[in-house]
Image (cartoon, rainbow, N blue to C red):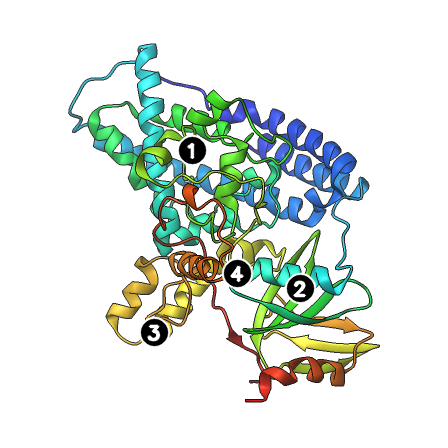
Amino acid sequence: MTLPNPVDYAVPAFVLLVLAEMIVARLRDRAAYEPRDTLTSLSLGLGSTVAGALTGGLTYLLAVWLWQFRLFEIGYSWYWFVIAFVIDDFAYYLFHRSAHRVRWFWASHVIHHSSQHYNLSTALRQTWTGFFSLGFVFRLPLFLIGFPPAMIFFVAALNLIYQFWIHTEVITRMPRWFEAVMNTPSHHRVHHAINPRYLDSNYAGVFIIWDRMLGTFEAERDDERPIYGIVRQLGSFNLVWSAFHEWVGIARDVWAAPGLRAKIGYIAMPPGWSHDGSRDTSATLKAQWRTRQDRTGKILGEEQWKKPILSSSGLDQAGARSPAA
Amino acid sequence: MNWLQLGGSLAAILLLAWIARLLRLGESRITDPEMAKATAEAMLAGFEARDALLSGDGNAAIVSGNAGIAVLKRHGAKVAVRRLVPPLALRPAVEGVRVETGESFFGGVTLFGVIEDDVRRLEAPLTLV
């Protein structure tokens, strides 16, 4: 069965909505957009589409090959599309969580987080190295279950389209029932934030219930506005550097690491991990933040604090020595 | 993806970036020392700001704190920060001083209306051990 690619039909709407949000930014907050940031984000999006077109065939072939060994026969009835959409969204959650906790996957995903802005153009800021980083492996079990590759590719595209509109500050909150079940701009703002409280949370694609069930949910607070980007901000609009900077970082670290264990650690451990403990992961940043809050007695909403969440979301080689030192 | 889609996407990207410029989006500046200190504290986990020096053009600042010197530069509509350990690498610049970060893509930061002695005074409490 041949299914259309829904993204092809959504692109004109993406363009119009970015334009509409720019006009809102002109009226409300001119700092919500930056022309060079927008150019970089959209160019990364186009590059990602080109990379996807070049490698998508290989992923599809792999999916079809695996599908031969399927456990169940699943047809194209409408309800299978619904079930596939939900299960695919859970696979996305697992991928996304790994993308923040394993540096190899993070090197690809960091591109999406490296803008300091949070607007609809950020949604289109996507990786060029998704295939290389093997992010597709999280969806492979779906083909072994028996979902036809065309169906999974179709629902995955719908998932991607859903995630476009949540990249905005224009919408404050959705109705309570919607916030409880679905991923929303509010939940996803938290995900893009580098505030220690918000690090490593809200990995959901469409349904926020995965985060609620698996202990990675964090609500946006009115008294703590999200600061967007990565812990160590890029500070550059260079397109190529934006696309590959973390891969360069991995290569440098692996090259300089003493011994095989450390080399593997720089690839497989959370972003910010270092063999000598000289850098901060998001887990250590959270722990330090919590200690400071406890010490100063300023902790707010302690009852809402559930637990320190494990690892990741960008490294901070904090305290880097100045070139003169 | 075909060539038409590729060309159309490229045209749409350039059009949107041009419109963003036309609407004069992204304009901002580091307006005062308090803003510089608050930004450094917000961007660097655990950083407690003490003093700040601002560039006269509002595009840069340095902030001393409990954990070194925060070097701030306006990055479009936002501010990007690096934490450095003093003594800072300084170079004379036209009508000011340039702080080198040692990162080619982040680049150096020029503080207009600031002289090297001002920077050394700011970092002095951190270098006297």
**Could you give the CA–CA distance between mark 1 and mark 3, rounded to whole angstroms?**
35 Å
**Could you give the CA–CA distance between mark 2 and mark 3, rounded to whole angstroms?**
30 Å
* Label 1 sits on residue: A205
Question: Which of label 2 and label 3 is nearer to you?
Answer: 2
The label number, if any, that marks residue A232 in the structure image: 4
Q: Residue at x 65, y 71 (%)?
A: B50
Q: Chain of mark 2?
A: B
Neighbourhood count class around disc 1 (C-alpha, 10 Å): few under 14, some 14–19, many 20 upward:
many
> In the rendering, at what x and y percent does residue B120 appear?
69, 84
Neighbourhood count class around disc 3 (C-alpha, 10 Å): few under 14, some 14–19, many 20 upward:
few
Neighbourhood count class around disc 4 (C-alpha, 10 Å): few under 14, some 14–19, many 20 upward:
many
Q: Is residue A150 visible?
A: no
* Label 3 sits on residue: A276
Question: Which of label 1 and label 2 is nearer to you?
Answer: 2
The amino acid type, in three-letter code, at marker 1 is Gly
Q: Toward the viewer: A37 or B67?
A: B67
Q: Toward the viewer: A243 or A3?
A: A243
* Label 2 sits on residue: B37
**Could you give the CA–CA distance between mark 4 and mark 3, rounded to whole angstroms?**
19 Å
- Residues indicated by labels 4 and 1 sit on the same polypeptide chain: yes
Question: Height in image: A54 above or below A257?
Answer: above
Q: Residue at x 72, y 66 (%)?
A: B60
The amino acid type, in three-letter code, at marker 2 is Lys
The amino acid type, in three-letter code, at marker 4 is Arg
The label number, if any, that marks residue A180 in the structure image: none
The amino acid type, in three-letter code, at marker 3 is Asp
Q: Earlier in the sequence, mark 4 or mark 1?
A: 1
> In the rendering, at what x and y percent does residue B100 appear?
64, 76
| Residue B55 relative to residue A83: left or right | right
